[in-house]
Amino acid sequence: MTQIALDDSARADLSDRDRKPEDHTHEVFPDVPYRRLGIVNVVFFGRTGAQSGEWVLVDAGLPGTAGMIQSAASARFSANSRPSCIIMTHAHADHAGGLRSLADKWGVEVYAHDLELPYLNGTASYPPPDPKVGGGAMPALSVLFPRGPFNVAGCLRSLPADHSVPGMPGWEWIHTPGHTPGHISLWRASDRTLIAGDAFITTNQESVYSVMTQKAEMHGPPMYYTQNWEEAEASVHNLANLEPEYAVTGHGHAMKGEKLRRALHQLADSFRTVAVPRKGKYTAHPTSVQTGTAYVTGQRRNQ
Ligand SMILES: [Zn+2]
Ligand SMILES: [Zn+2]
């Protein structure tokens, strides 16, 4: 079932800007390319040919995709090029899967929101996914995804308190909790470009068919892994009110323009009826940072 209609005519990446097909990236701007790795996008912020230390990786893909991320970086920038740092929108396994090996290999710092750090320093796992929401097969499969804790404590840093983004001048980070407690999005006001993570997405991530075909729609955060729907709704309102011209999301194609903005406002305004699962585990019992239910401790370490 479609949440909010949106079609390929709103795609931001259908242009002659995708000049370097060997790196398999789509360009939204020359310095904002992204690559889909199976079911998830990663962003390589930086201009073609950037040297080591002159670009930034946003999120780190599925487990087992570190080599693909490195090869895309080598093709786009320079051979064995290293970023200045890695920024994490959040630490779900499909976004943090390659993180440990990339951080080790590159020897770079990893930045995340304070409330996301426990999932990345070996102290906490995410609460279990909700396999019954959304009607598709992905929620049922989600119980198989690793959910941490991941441990990159040695290179892990808090995002700057002034909301600047290391290595990305002109950008700011925005706290967009709900999907996870420390979820962030990145915003460049000069051209109204948003890197939204999973605060909202542009395909139906519960449907294997949509995930395979990348069929476009405006969609709330992936249902099976969203811990607090009230916060998620507020975050979508905040992002809609930015009136983005371009949006790169964690899942689905990048979108642009009036169609993007209209669909995003529609999602915000009808969030409770279209995006929130009626009988979801976390609909009735949202997790909380204050009570500690957002963090599951005492489980496996060093994944
Ligand atoms: Zn996620
Ligand atoms: Zn995701």
Image (spheres, rainbow, N blue to C red):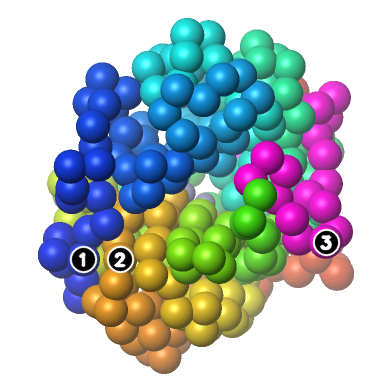
Crowd tier of the residue under label 2, counting other residues whose Cα lies within 10 Å: few below 14, some 14–19, many 20 or above: many
- Which one is nearer the viewer's eye here, 282 or 149? 149
Q: Which residue is mark 1?
A: 10
Task: Find residue 117 and name its label.
Answer: none
Q: Is residue 10 left or right of residue 242?
A: left
Q: Are marks 1 and 3 in contact (CB under 8 Å)?
A: no
Q: Amino acid at mark 3?
A: Asp
Q: What residue sits 32% from the left and 43% below the top?
A: 27
Q: Mark 2 vs mark 3: which is more N-terminal?
A: 3
Find the magenta span and give its range: 147-168
Q: Which residue is mark 2?
A: 256
User: What numbered label is drawn on residue 162?
Assistant: 3
x and y percentages locating residue 96 in the rendered image: 58, 35
Q: CA distance from mark 2 to mark 3?
A: 28 Å
Instruction: Identify the element where label 2 is drawn.
Output: strand
Q: Nearer the viewer, residue 292 or 99?
A: 99
> Distance between the Cα atoms at labels 1 and 3?
33 Å
Q: Is residue 282 above or below residue 22?
A: below
